[in-house]
Amino acid sequence: MKTVSTRRAFISGTAATAALARCWGGGFLSAAKARRLNILYIMTDDHAAHAIGAYGSRINKTPHMDEMARSGMILSNCFCTNPICTPSRGGILTGEYSHRNGVPVFNNISRDKKTVGGYMRDAGYYTAFVGKWHLGGPKTVRDEDWDRWMVYANQGVYFNPWFWEKKDGKIVRTDYPGEYATENITRITKDVIDGARATGKPFFVMMHHKAPHRNWLPSDKYRAKFRAMTLKDIPIPATLFDNWKGRASPIKTTAMTVLRHMRLKEDLKLAEYFSGGGQFEFEGRRYEGRKNAQGQYVDRWPEGMENNDRAKAALSYLRYMQDYLACVQSVDDSVGEMRAYLKEKGILDDTLVIYTSDQGFFLGDHGLYDKRFMMEEVIKMPMIVSCPRLIKPGSVNGDMVTNIDFAPTFLDIANAPKPAQMQGESFLPNLEGNTPSNWRKDCYFRYYVEGGEHATSAWYGIRTETDKLMYYYKRDEWEYFDLARDPEELSNEYANPRYAERIAALKKRLYELKASLGDTDQYKDAKEYGPIGR
Ligand code: SGN
Ligand code: CA
Protein backbone atom coordinates (compact mmCIF):
# COMPACT_ATOMS: atom_id res chain seq x y z
CA MET A 1 0.00 0.00 0.00
CA LYS A 2 1.15 3.60 0.60
CA THR A 3 1.07 4.53 -3.05
CA VAL A 4 -0.56 7.90 -3.08
CA SER A 5 1.95 9.64 -5.31
CA THR A 6 1.86 7.05 -8.09
CA ARG A 7 -1.88 7.03 -7.91
CA ARG A 8 -2.10 10.77 -8.17
CA ALA A 9 -0.61 10.54 -11.65
CA PHE A 10 -3.01 7.76 -12.54
CA ILE A 11 -6.07 9.61 -11.44
CA SER A 12 -5.33 12.96 -12.96
CA GLY A 13 -3.91 11.53 -16.14
CA THR A 14 -6.93 10.68 -18.23
CA ALA A 15 -8.45 12.75 -20.97
CA ALA A 16 -11.91 12.24 -19.51
CA THR A 17 -10.75 13.70 -16.25
CA ALA A 18 -9.26 16.70 -17.96
CA ALA A 19 -12.49 17.34 -19.84
CA LEU A 20 -14.57 17.10 -16.69
CA ALA A 21 -12.15 19.30 -14.81
CA ARG A 22 -12.72 22.03 -17.39
CA CYS A 23 -16.45 21.98 -16.71
CA TRP A 24 -15.94 22.11 -12.98
CA GLY A 25 -15.57 25.62 -11.70
CA GLY A 26 -15.23 24.99 -7.96
CA GLY A 27 -16.98 26.99 -5.23
CA PHE A 28 -20.22 25.08 -5.37
CA LEU A 29 -20.70 24.93 -1.62
CA SER A 30 -23.78 27.08 -1.30
CA ALA A 31 -25.36 25.68 -4.45
CA ALA A 32 -24.77 22.18 -3.17
CA LYS A 33 -26.34 22.99 0.14
CA ALA A 34 -29.29 24.68 -1.48
CA ARG A 35 -29.84 21.63 -3.63
CA ARG A 36 -29.66 19.31 -0.65
CA LEU A 37 -27.99 16.55 -2.54
CA ASN A 38 -29.09 12.97 -2.23
CA ILE A 39 -26.60 10.79 -0.41
CA LEU A 40 -25.93 7.17 -1.28
CA TYR A 41 -23.54 5.83 1.30
CA ILE A 42 -22.10 2.46 0.26
CA MET A 43 -20.11 0.65 2.93
CA THR A 44 -18.54 -2.76 2.78
CA ASP A 45 -17.20 -4.89 5.58
CA ASP A 46 -13.41 -5.29 5.84
CA HIS A 47 -12.46 -4.01 2.39
CA ALA A 48 -8.91 -2.68 2.66
CA ALA A 49 -7.99 0.32 0.52
CA HIS A 50 -4.99 -1.54 -0.84
CA ALA A 51 -7.37 -3.90 -2.63
CA ILE A 52 -8.71 -1.06 -4.78
CA GLY A 53 -7.06 -0.17 -8.07
CA ALA A 54 -7.41 3.55 -7.50
CA TYR A 55 -5.54 3.19 -4.21
CA GLY A 56 -2.65 1.53 -5.98
CA SER A 57 -3.59 -2.13 -5.55
CA ARG A 58 -0.98 -4.62 -6.77
CA ILE A 59 -3.31 -7.56 -6.35
CA ASN A 60 -6.61 -6.82 -8.08
CA LYS A 61 -8.51 -4.59 -10.43
CA THR A 62 -11.60 -2.61 -9.50
CA PRO A 63 -12.72 -0.83 -12.68
CA HIS A 64 -15.93 0.60 -11.27
CA MET A 65 -14.38 2.02 -8.12
CA ASP A 66 -11.56 3.43 -10.21
CA GLU A 67 -14.05 5.07 -12.53
CA MET A 68 -15.80 6.55 -9.51
CA ALA A 69 -12.45 7.87 -8.27
CA ARG A 70 -11.73 9.42 -11.66
CA SER A 71 -15.04 11.21 -11.62
CA GLY A 72 -14.70 12.27 -7.98
CA MET A 73 -12.25 12.30 -5.12
CA ILE A 74 -10.14 9.85 -3.20
CA LEU A 75 -9.35 10.58 0.41
CA SER A 76 -6.03 8.99 1.21
CA ASN A 77 -6.11 9.60 4.95
CA CYS A 78 -9.53 8.51 6.08
CA PHE A 79 -9.27 6.67 9.40
CA CYS A 80 -11.35 4.43 11.61
CA THR A 81 -10.92 5.56 15.21
CA ASN A 82 -11.75 2.13 16.71
CA PRO A 83 -10.93 -0.31 13.93
CA ILE A 84 -13.45 -3.07 14.38
CA CYS A 85 -16.91 -3.44 12.95
CA THR A 86 -19.48 -2.61 15.59
CA PRO A 87 -17.61 0.35 17.12
CA SER A 88 -16.83 1.75 13.68
CA ARG A 89 -20.50 1.64 12.79
CA GLY A 90 -21.40 3.16 16.15
CA GLY A 91 -19.05 6.06 15.43
CA ILE A 92 -20.39 6.55 11.92
CA LEU A 93 -24.01 6.62 13.02
CA THR A 94 -23.55 8.85 16.07
CA GLY A 95 -20.63 11.14 15.23
CA GLU A 96 -19.21 10.28 18.65
CA TYR A 97 -16.21 8.26 19.79
CA SER A 98 -16.82 4.84 21.34
CA HIS A 99 -16.33 6.02 24.91
CA ARG A 100 -19.14 8.51 24.39
CA ASN A 101 -21.60 6.59 22.22
CA GLY A 102 -21.48 3.49 24.41
CA VAL A 103 -20.30 1.12 21.66
CA PRO A 104 -16.64 0.29 22.45
CA VAL A 105 -16.78 -3.43 21.58
CA PHE A 106 -19.31 -5.84 20.11
CA ASN A 107 -22.24 -4.56 22.09
CA ASN A 108 -25.73 -3.23 21.46
CA ILE A 109 -26.21 0.40 20.63
CA SER A 110 -28.77 1.92 22.93
CA ARG A 111 -32.13 2.34 21.30
CA ASP A 112 -32.25 5.77 22.88
CA LYS A 113 -29.26 6.89 20.88
CA LYS A 114 -30.53 9.03 18.03
CA THR A 115 -28.48 8.31 14.93
CA VAL A 116 -27.59 10.43 11.94
CA GLY A 117 -30.56 8.81 10.20
CA GLY A 118 -32.86 10.54 12.67
CA TYR A 119 -31.20 13.92 12.26
CA MET A 120 -31.29 13.62 8.48
CA ARG A 121 -34.95 12.69 8.68
CA ASP A 122 -35.64 15.77 10.81
CA ALA A 123 -33.88 17.78 8.11
CA GLY A 124 -36.45 16.59 5.57
CA TYR A 125 -34.61 13.69 4.02
CA TYR A 126 -36.06 10.31 3.22
CA THR A 127 -33.81 7.99 5.21
CA ALA A 128 -33.18 4.30 4.63
CA PHE A 129 -30.85 1.70 6.01
CA VAL A 130 -30.22 -1.57 4.16
CA GLY A 131 -27.82 -4.37 5.16
CA LYS A 132 -25.36 -5.08 7.93
CA TRP A 133 -26.26 -3.32 11.14
CA HIS A 134 -24.21 -5.30 13.69
CA LEU A 135 -25.08 -3.00 16.55
CA GLY A 136 -27.48 -5.46 18.14
CA GLY A 137 -30.60 -7.09 16.81
CA PRO A 138 -33.49 -5.36 15.03
CA LYS A 139 -34.85 -4.09 18.34
CA THR A 140 -31.89 -1.74 18.60
CA VAL A 141 -32.88 0.02 15.37
CA ARG A 142 -34.72 3.26 16.14
CA ASP A 143 -37.83 3.34 13.96
CA GLU A 144 -37.96 7.10 14.36
CA ASP A 145 -34.65 7.44 12.49
CA TRP A 146 -35.53 5.62 9.29
CA ASP A 147 -38.34 5.79 6.77
CA ARG A 148 -37.30 2.29 5.79
CA TRP A 149 -34.91 -0.17 7.35
CA MET A 150 -33.91 -3.73 6.56
CA VAL A 151 -31.08 -5.22 8.60
CA TYR A 152 -29.11 -8.44 8.54
CA ALA A 153 -29.01 -10.50 11.70
CA ASN A 154 -25.54 -10.18 13.22
CA GLN A 155 -22.96 -10.60 10.41
CA GLY A 156 -25.45 -11.52 7.70
CA VAL A 157 -24.88 -14.39 5.29
CA TYR A 158 -23.47 -14.62 1.76
CA PHE A 159 -26.05 -16.97 0.29
CA ASN A 160 -29.81 -16.94 0.62
CA PRO A 161 -29.71 -13.59 2.42
CA TRP A 162 -32.49 -12.41 4.63
CA PHE A 163 -33.36 -9.26 6.57
CA TRP A 164 -35.24 -8.17 9.63
CA GLU A 165 -37.62 -5.38 8.81
CA LYS A 166 -40.69 -3.74 10.24
CA LYS A 167 -44.03 -4.37 8.63
CA ASP A 168 -47.31 -3.22 10.13
CA GLY A 169 -45.60 -2.53 13.42
CA LYS A 170 -44.07 -5.99 13.66
CA ILE A 171 -40.50 -7.14 13.15
CA VAL A 172 -40.59 -9.77 10.41
CA ARG A 173 -38.05 -11.76 8.49
CA THR A 174 -37.85 -11.47 4.71
CA ASP A 175 -35.93 -14.18 2.87
CA TYR A 176 -34.31 -14.06 -0.55
CA PRO A 177 -33.58 -17.69 -1.34
CA GLY A 178 -31.18 -18.44 -4.16
CA GLU A 179 -29.51 -15.04 -4.16
CA TYR A 180 -25.99 -13.87 -3.46
CA ALA A 181 -25.86 -11.14 -0.81
CA THR A 182 -23.88 -8.58 -2.82
CA GLU A 183 -26.21 -8.86 -5.81
CA ASN A 184 -29.28 -9.02 -3.63
CA ILE A 185 -28.52 -5.83 -1.71
CA THR A 186 -27.82 -4.02 -4.97
CA ARG A 187 -31.23 -4.88 -6.32
CA ILE A 188 -32.97 -4.05 -3.06
CA THR A 189 -31.21 -0.71 -2.65
CA LYS A 190 -32.37 0.35 -6.11
CA ASP A 191 -35.95 -0.46 -5.09
CA VAL A 192 -35.48 1.48 -1.88
CA ILE A 193 -34.24 4.51 -3.81
CA ASP A 194 -37.21 4.24 -6.19
CA GLY A 195 -39.45 4.36 -3.13
CA ALA A 196 -37.56 7.32 -1.71
CA ARG A 197 -37.86 9.27 -4.93
CA ALA A 198 -41.59 8.74 -5.06
CA THR A 199 -41.84 10.88 -1.91
CA GLY A 200 -40.21 13.85 -3.63
CA LYS A 201 -37.72 14.24 -0.78
CA PRO A 202 -33.96 14.10 -1.10
CA PHE A 203 -32.71 10.75 0.12
CA PHE A 204 -30.08 9.52 2.53
CA VAL A 205 -29.56 5.82 1.94
CA MET A 206 -27.05 3.67 3.79
CA MET A 207 -26.23 0.49 1.88
CA HIS A 208 -24.16 -1.82 4.10
CA HIS A 209 -22.75 -4.86 2.35
CA LYS A 210 -21.92 -8.17 3.94
CA ALA A 211 -18.89 -8.67 1.69
CA PRO A 212 -15.95 -9.11 1.80
CA HIS A 213 -16.08 -10.26 5.45
CA ARG A 214 -14.63 -13.56 6.61
CA ASN A 215 -15.15 -16.34 5.61
CA TRP A 216 -15.02 -14.86 2.10
CA LEU A 217 -17.60 -16.80 0.09
CA PRO A 218 -17.51 -15.65 -3.54
CA SER A 219 -20.33 -15.67 -6.05
CA ASP A 220 -20.46 -18.32 -8.75
CA LYS A 221 -19.58 -15.55 -11.16
CA TYR A 222 -16.09 -15.09 -9.73
CA ARG A 223 -15.15 -18.11 -7.61
CA ALA A 224 -13.53 -20.22 -10.31
CA LYS A 225 -11.89 -17.27 -12.00
CA PHE A 226 -10.01 -16.27 -8.85
CA ARG A 227 -9.30 -19.86 -7.79
CA ALA A 228 -7.34 -20.23 -11.02
CA MET A 229 -5.03 -17.36 -10.07
CA THR A 230 -1.49 -17.88 -8.86
CA LEU A 231 0.98 -15.82 -6.86
CA LYS A 232 1.93 -14.20 -10.16
CA ASP A 233 -1.56 -12.73 -10.37
CA ILE A 234 -1.83 -12.01 -6.66
CA PRO A 235 1.71 -11.28 -5.49
CA ILE A 236 2.55 -11.66 -1.83
CA PRO A 237 2.86 -8.42 0.12
CA ALA A 238 6.34 -7.14 0.92
CA THR A 239 5.77 -7.72 4.63
CA LEU A 240 4.26 -11.24 4.55
CA PHE A 241 7.36 -12.63 6.21
CA ASP A 242 7.83 -9.78 8.69
CA ASN A 243 9.70 -11.27 11.65
CA TRP A 244 8.31 -8.61 14.07
CA LYS A 245 11.77 -7.93 15.41
CA GLY A 246 11.78 -5.10 17.93
CA ARG A 247 8.01 -4.96 18.09
CA ALA A 248 5.96 -4.87 21.29
CA SER A 249 4.44 -8.18 22.36
CA PRO A 250 0.88 -7.96 20.92
CA ILE A 251 1.75 -8.80 17.33
CA LYS A 252 3.71 -11.80 18.57
CA THR A 253 0.87 -13.23 20.62
CA THR A 254 -2.04 -12.48 18.32
CA ALA A 255 -4.11 -15.19 16.65
CA MET A 256 -4.35 -13.45 13.30
CA THR A 257 -1.53 -14.95 11.29
CA VAL A 258 -2.16 -16.37 7.84
CA LEU A 259 0.32 -19.10 8.68
CA ARG A 260 -1.19 -20.46 11.86
CA HIS A 261 -4.65 -19.05 12.39
CA MET A 262 -6.68 -19.68 9.33
CA ARG A 263 -9.16 -22.49 9.44
CA LEU A 264 -8.45 -25.09 6.81
CA LYS A 265 -12.07 -25.70 6.13
CA GLU A 266 -14.00 -22.49 6.66
CA ASP A 267 -11.31 -20.00 5.67
CA LEU A 268 -9.06 -21.76 3.19
CA LYS A 269 -11.69 -24.23 2.01
CA LEU A 270 -9.00 -26.88 1.95
CA ALA A 271 -10.56 -29.37 4.28
CA GLU A 272 -13.30 -29.95 1.76
CA TYR A 273 -10.56 -31.97 0.09
CA PHE A 274 -9.15 -33.32 3.32
CA SER A 275 -8.93 -37.05 3.40
CA GLY A 276 -6.61 -37.57 6.31
CA GLY A 277 -3.38 -38.28 4.47
CA GLY A 278 -1.44 -37.28 1.47
CA GLN A 279 0.01 -34.20 0.00
CA PHE A 280 0.43 -31.53 2.61
CA GLU A 281 0.94 -31.18 6.25
CA PHE A 282 -0.27 -27.94 7.68
CA GLU A 283 0.44 -27.17 11.29
CA GLY A 284 0.31 -30.82 12.17
CA ARG A 285 -2.87 -31.28 10.20
CA ARG A 286 -2.57 -33.17 6.97
CA TYR A 287 -4.71 -32.69 3.98
CA GLU A 288 -4.74 -34.03 0.53
CA GLY A 289 -4.58 -31.69 -2.41
CA ARG A 290 -7.70 -31.36 -4.45
CA LYS A 291 -7.81 -33.61 -7.49
CA ASN A 292 -9.02 -32.42 -10.84
CA ALA A 293 -11.12 -34.48 -13.25
CA GLN A 294 -8.00 -36.26 -14.46
CA GLY A 295 -7.17 -37.33 -10.93
CA GLN A 296 -4.17 -35.01 -10.68
CA TYR A 297 -3.51 -32.93 -7.61
CA VAL A 298 -4.42 -29.28 -8.08
CA ASP A 299 -3.20 -27.88 -4.77
CA ARG A 300 0.56 -27.68 -4.75
CA TRP A 301 3.10 -25.67 -2.92
CA PRO A 302 3.54 -22.33 -4.64
CA GLU A 303 6.02 -22.50 -7.45
CA GLY A 304 9.64 -22.48 -6.33
CA MET A 305 8.72 -23.05 -2.71
CA GLU A 306 9.40 -25.97 -0.48
CA ASN A 307 7.36 -27.44 2.28
CA ASN A 308 8.27 -24.96 4.98
CA ASP A 309 6.67 -22.10 6.89
CA ARG A 310 7.22 -19.59 4.13
CA ALA A 311 5.54 -21.81 1.58
CA LYS A 312 2.68 -22.53 3.94
CA ALA A 313 2.17 -18.84 4.62
CA ALA A 314 2.26 -18.12 0.88
CA LEU A 315 -0.22 -20.88 0.08
CA SER A 316 -2.50 -19.80 2.85
CA TYR A 317 -2.24 -16.19 1.66
CA LEU A 318 -3.08 -17.20 -1.89
CA ARG A 319 -6.13 -19.19 -0.89
CA TYR A 320 -7.32 -16.42 1.36
CA MET A 321 -6.83 -13.76 -1.30
CA GLN A 322 -8.45 -15.75 -4.08
CA ASP A 323 -11.74 -15.77 -2.23
CA TYR A 324 -11.43 -12.35 -0.61
CA LEU A 325 -10.71 -10.67 -3.93
CA ALA A 326 -13.47 -12.59 -5.68
CA CYS A 327 -15.87 -11.15 -3.07
CA VAL A 328 -14.45 -7.68 -3.70
CA GLN A 329 -15.08 -8.11 -7.42
CA SER A 330 -18.80 -8.50 -6.83
CA VAL A 331 -18.75 -5.38 -4.69
CA ASP A 332 -17.02 -3.52 -7.50
CA ASP A 333 -19.77 -4.63 -9.87
CA SER A 334 -22.32 -3.39 -7.37
CA VAL A 335 -20.71 0.05 -7.22
CA GLY A 336 -20.81 0.20 -11.01
CA GLU A 337 -24.43 -0.90 -11.06
CA MET A 338 -25.53 1.63 -8.47
CA ARG A 339 -23.89 4.49 -10.31
CA ALA A 340 -25.32 3.30 -13.63
CA TYR A 341 -28.75 3.17 -12.02
CA LEU A 342 -28.43 6.75 -10.70
CA LYS A 343 -27.34 7.89 -14.13
CA GLU A 344 -30.22 6.14 -15.84
CA LYS A 345 -32.63 7.88 -13.46
CA GLY A 346 -30.95 11.20 -14.23
CA ILE A 347 -29.89 11.81 -10.64
CA LEU A 348 -26.18 10.98 -10.65
CA ASP A 349 -25.28 14.67 -10.70
CA ASP A 350 -27.48 15.37 -7.70
CA THR A 351 -26.26 12.48 -5.61
CA LEU A 352 -23.20 12.33 -3.45
CA VAL A 353 -22.04 8.73 -3.72
CA ILE A 354 -19.63 7.49 -1.10
CA TYR A 355 -17.73 4.24 -1.14
CA THR A 356 -16.03 3.12 2.05
CA SER A 357 -15.50 0.16 4.35
CA ASP A 358 -16.03 -0.10 8.12
CA GLN A 359 -12.27 -0.44 8.54
CA GLY A 360 -9.27 -1.72 6.64
CA PHE A 361 -7.86 -5.22 6.78
CA PHE A 362 -4.56 -7.06 6.76
CA LEU A 363 -4.13 -8.79 3.41
CA GLY A 364 -1.20 -10.89 4.54
CA ASP A 365 0.60 -7.67 5.49
CA HIS A 366 2.96 -8.37 8.41
CA GLY A 367 1.90 -12.00 8.06
CA LEU A 368 -1.61 -11.20 9.27
CA TYR A 369 -5.29 -11.13 8.40
CA ASP A 370 -8.17 -9.38 10.23
CA LYS A 371 -7.84 -5.90 11.77
CA ARG A 372 -7.83 -4.62 15.41
CA PHE A 373 -4.30 -3.16 15.38
CA MET A 374 -3.37 0.47 14.88
CA MET A 375 -1.44 -0.25 11.74
CA GLU A 376 -1.99 1.57 8.48
CA GLU A 377 -3.60 -1.33 6.62
CA VAL A 378 -6.25 -1.48 9.34
CA ILE A 379 -7.03 2.06 10.42
CA LYS A 380 -7.21 3.35 6.85
CA MET A 381 -10.70 3.27 5.41
CA PRO A 382 -11.09 3.56 1.67
CA MET A 383 -13.05 6.73 0.93
CA ILE A 384 -14.09 7.51 -2.61
CA VAL A 385 -16.64 10.26 -3.07
CA SER A 386 -18.22 11.33 -6.30
CA CYS A 387 -20.59 14.14 -7.04
CA PRO A 388 -20.09 16.18 -10.20
CA ARG A 389 -21.76 19.25 -8.72
CA LEU A 390 -19.51 19.33 -5.74
CA ILE A 391 -16.22 17.63 -6.35
CA LYS A 392 -13.50 18.26 -8.85
CA PRO A 393 -13.07 15.05 -10.84
CA GLY A 394 -9.91 13.09 -10.31
CA SER A 395 -8.92 14.83 -7.09
CA VAL A 396 -6.93 13.31 -4.26
CA ASN A 397 -7.23 14.72 -0.80
CA GLY A 398 -4.78 13.87 1.98
CA ASP A 399 -6.56 15.62 4.87
CA MET A 400 -7.01 13.51 7.97
CA VAL A 401 -10.67 12.63 8.34
CA THR A 402 -12.26 9.96 10.50
CA ASN A 403 -15.42 7.89 10.74
CA ILE A 404 -16.56 10.28 13.49
CA ASP A 405 -16.71 13.04 10.87
CA PHE A 406 -19.16 11.23 8.60
CA ALA A 407 -22.37 12.16 10.42
CA PRO A 408 -21.48 15.88 10.71
CA THR A 409 -20.60 15.85 7.00
CA PHE A 410 -23.96 14.36 6.00
CA LEU A 411 -25.75 16.91 8.16
CA ASP A 412 -23.76 19.72 6.60
CA ILE A 413 -24.89 18.55 3.16
CA ALA A 414 -28.46 18.55 4.43
CA ASN A 415 -27.86 22.10 5.66
CA ALA A 416 -28.75 20.94 9.16
CA PRO A 417 -26.96 21.99 12.34
CA LYS A 418 -24.53 19.64 14.04
CA PRO A 419 -26.01 18.31 17.30
CA ALA A 420 -23.98 19.36 20.33
CA GLN A 421 -22.92 15.84 21.31
CA MET A 422 -21.33 15.08 17.93
CA GLN A 423 -17.54 15.18 18.16
CA GLY A 424 -16.59 15.02 14.49
CA GLU A 425 -16.19 17.82 11.98
CA SER A 426 -17.83 18.17 8.59
CA PHE A 427 -15.38 17.63 5.76
CA LEU A 428 -17.74 19.02 3.15
CA PRO A 429 -15.38 22.00 2.58
CA ASN A 430 -12.48 19.56 2.09
CA LEU A 431 -14.48 17.67 -0.52
CA GLU A 432 -14.92 20.93 -2.38
CA GLY A 433 -11.23 21.61 -2.33
CA ASN A 434 -11.47 24.25 0.42
CA THR A 435 -9.76 22.62 3.38
CA PRO A 436 -10.11 24.92 6.41
CA SER A 437 -6.74 26.34 7.43
CA ASN A 438 -7.12 24.98 10.95
CA TRP A 439 -8.00 21.44 9.85
CA ARG A 440 -6.67 18.80 12.26
CA LYS A 441 -3.15 17.46 11.99
CA ASP A 442 -3.55 14.46 14.28
CA CYS A 443 -6.16 11.89 15.29
CA TYR A 444 -6.94 9.86 18.37
CA PHE A 445 -7.62 6.12 18.22
CA ARG A 446 -8.55 3.41 20.69
CA TYR A 447 -9.30 -0.29 20.57
CA TYR A 448 -10.62 -2.03 23.68
CA VAL A 449 -10.24 -5.80 23.42
CA GLU A 450 -7.52 -7.56 25.35
CA GLY A 451 -7.66 -11.25 24.41
CA GLY A 452 -10.81 -12.32 22.61
CA GLU A 453 -11.27 -14.32 19.41
CA HIS A 454 -8.03 -13.14 17.82
CA ALA A 455 -5.98 -12.72 21.02
CA THR A 456 -5.44 -9.04 20.42
CA SER A 457 -4.33 -6.34 22.81
CA ALA A 458 -6.11 -3.16 23.90
CA TRP A 459 -4.43 0.13 23.01
CA TYR A 460 -4.85 3.81 22.46
CA GLY A 461 -2.73 6.00 20.27
CA ILE A 462 -2.15 9.04 18.16
CA ARG A 463 -1.34 9.40 14.48
CA THR A 464 -0.06 12.60 12.99
CA GLU A 465 0.80 13.15 9.33
CA THR A 466 4.26 11.72 9.93
CA ASP A 467 4.32 9.78 13.20
CA LYS A 468 2.42 7.16 15.11
CA LEU A 469 2.54 6.38 18.81
CA MET A 470 0.51 3.73 20.57
CA TYR A 471 0.20 2.42 24.09
CA TYR A 472 -0.86 -1.15 24.90
CA TYR A 473 -2.16 -0.18 28.28
CA LYS A 474 -2.92 -3.67 29.57
CA ARG A 475 0.69 -4.65 28.95
CA ASP A 476 2.36 -1.32 29.62
CA GLU A 477 4.15 -1.42 26.27
CA TRP A 478 4.61 1.34 23.71
CA GLU A 479 5.30 1.43 20.01
CA TYR A 480 6.43 4.37 17.95
CA PHE A 481 6.83 4.51 14.16
CA ASP A 482 8.38 7.22 12.05
CA LEU A 483 5.92 6.92 9.17
CA ALA A 484 7.89 9.22 6.91
CA ARG A 485 10.98 7.00 7.08
CA ASP A 486 9.27 3.71 7.71
CA PRO A 487 5.87 3.69 6.00
CA GLU A 488 5.62 -0.10 6.32
CA GLU A 489 5.88 0.16 10.13
CA LEU A 490 8.61 -2.40 10.43
CA SER A 491 10.78 -0.63 12.94
CA ASN A 492 9.52 0.23 16.40
CA GLU A 493 11.68 3.17 17.46
CA TYR A 494 10.17 3.69 20.87
CA ALA A 495 13.43 3.00 22.68
CA ASN A 496 15.60 4.90 20.20
CA PRO A 497 17.04 7.98 22.00
CA ARG A 498 17.08 9.83 18.68
CA TYR A 499 13.30 10.03 18.88
CA ALA A 500 12.99 10.75 22.60
CA GLU A 501 11.95 14.37 22.15
CA ARG A 502 9.48 13.66 19.40
CA ILE A 503 7.95 10.84 21.41
CA ALA A 504 7.63 13.04 24.50
CA ALA A 505 5.79 15.69 22.47
CA LEU A 506 3.52 13.07 20.92
CA LYS A 507 2.75 11.59 24.29
CA LYS A 508 1.75 14.98 25.63
CA ARG A 509 -0.51 15.54 22.64
CA LEU A 510 -1.97 12.04 22.95
CA TYR A 511 -3.12 12.72 26.49
CA GLU A 512 -4.39 16.17 25.54
CA LEU A 513 -6.51 14.64 22.79
CA LYS A 514 -7.70 11.84 25.03
CA ALA A 515 -8.81 14.32 27.70
CA SER A 516 -10.36 16.80 25.28
CA LEU A 517 -12.48 14.04 23.74
CA GLY A 518 -13.71 12.98 27.16
CA ASP A 519 -12.01 9.59 27.23
CA THR A 520 -11.57 8.87 30.92
CA ASP A 521 -11.00 5.13 30.44
CA GLN A 522 -14.73 4.48 30.82
CA TYR A 523 -14.48 1.08 29.12
CA LYS A 524 -10.91 0.10 29.87
CA ASP A 525 -11.88 -3.38 31.06
CA ALA A 526 -14.44 -4.04 28.33
CA LYS A 527 -14.69 -7.62 27.15
CA GLU A 528 -14.89 -8.42 23.44
CA TYR A 529 -18.60 -9.14 23.54
CA GLY A 530 -20.92 -6.91 25.48
CA PRO A 531 -24.58 -7.77 25.21
CA ILE A 532 -25.35 -8.02 21.54
CA GLY A 533 -28.53 -9.40 20.09
CA ARG A 534 -29.39 -10.85 16.75
C1 SGN B 1 -16.10 -12.81 13.31
C2 SGN B 1 -14.87 -13.40 12.63
C3 SGN B 1 -13.61 -12.70 13.11
C4 SGN B 1 -13.76 -11.21 12.98
C5 SGN B 1 -14.99 -10.75 13.72
C6 SGN B 1 -15.23 -9.29 13.66
N1 SGN B 1 -14.78 -14.79 12.90
O1 SGN B 1 -16.13 -13.12 14.66
O2 SGN B 1 -12.53 -13.17 12.36
O3 SGN B 1 -12.65 -10.54 13.49
O4 SGN B 1 -16.11 -11.41 13.16
O5 SGN B 1 -15.48 -8.86 12.36
S1 SGN B 1 -15.69 -15.78 12.03
O6 SGN B 1 -15.42 -17.10 12.58
O7 SGN B 1 -17.07 -15.43 12.18
O8 SGN B 1 -15.27 -15.68 10.66
S2 SGN B 1 -16.31 -7.57 12.22
O9 SGN B 1 -16.24 -7.14 10.83
O10 SGN B 1 -17.66 -7.85 12.62
O11 SGN B 1 -15.67 -6.60 13.08
CA1 CA C 1 -15.64 -5.11 9.62
Image (spheres, helix red, strand yellow):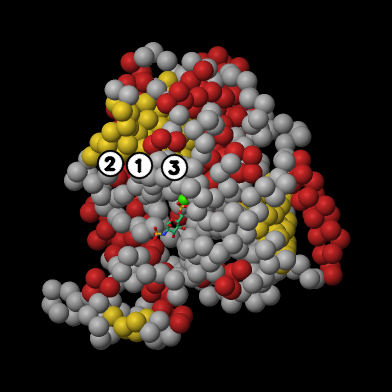
Give me the residue at 22% from left, 40% from top.
176
Camera-side residue of 187 and 391: 187
Q: Which residue is mark 2?
A: 162
**Pointer 2 local density, CA inside 10 Å: few below 14, some 14–19, many at least 20:** many
- Labels 1 and 2: the sequence-earlier one: 1
- Labels 3 and 2: the sequence-earlier one: 3
Disc 1/disc 2 C-alpha distance (Å): 7 Å
Q: Are marks 3 and 1 in contact (CB under 8 Å)?
A: no
Tell which residue pokes out farthest to the front in this image: 531
Q: Which kind of residue does numbered mark 2 sit on?
A: Trp
Q: Which residue is mark 1?
A: 152
Camera-side residue of 140 and 284: 140
- Determine which of the numbered discs, if any, sits on residue 331 in the image: none
Quarter of the image where one finds residue 500: bottom right
Disc 3/disc 2 C-alpha distance (Å): 16 Å
Q: Is the C terminus in the top left, top right, bottom left or bottom right quadrant?
A: top left
In front: label 3 or label 2: 3
Give me the residue at 84% from left, 68% from top.
498
What is the secondary structure assignment of the residue under circle 3? loop
What is the secondary structure assignment of the residue under circle 1? loop
Q: Is residue 161 above or below residue 483?
A: above
